[in-house]
Amino acid sequence: MRIFPNTESCLRLVRALAVETNENWMEANRYINMDDLREHKKLALRQAA
């Protein structure tokens, strides 16, 4: 008994899982926290005034 009827169906599943994993990773991991950047900008503007 085989799980996948052919190679193409296995590849479709693997690709779909890879795309979903990548999307979840991108949503969960941010390189720059924009809130911290905004606060830093506000502080810099206050100090410059």
Image (spheres, rainbow, N blue to C red):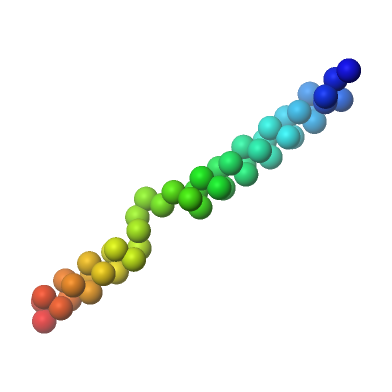
Where residue 14 sits, quadrant-wise, is top right
- Left of 23 or right of it: where is 48? left
Residue at the bottom extreme?
Answer: 49
Q: Position of residue 32 (x, y in %)?
A: 35, 55
Residue 6 lies left or right of residue 42; in this view the side is right
Q: Is residue 36 above or below residue 13?
A: below
* Tag count: 0
| Apparent side of residue 18 relative to residue 6 in the rendered image (left or right) | left
Picture layout, residue 48 above or below residue 18: below
| Quadrant placement of the C terminus | bottom left
- In the picture, the quarter occupied by the N terminus is top right
Q: Residue at x 37, y 50 (%)?
A: 31
Q: Residue at x 80, y 31 (%)?
A: 9
* Residue at image point 22% right, 67% down: 40
- The residue most toward the left is 48
Query: 29 or 44: nearer the eye?
Result: 29
Above or below residue 4? Residue 25 is below
Residue at 11% of width from left, 75% of height from top?
A: 47
Residue 45 in picture, x, y percent from top left: 17, 76
Q: Quadrant of residue 16?
A: top right
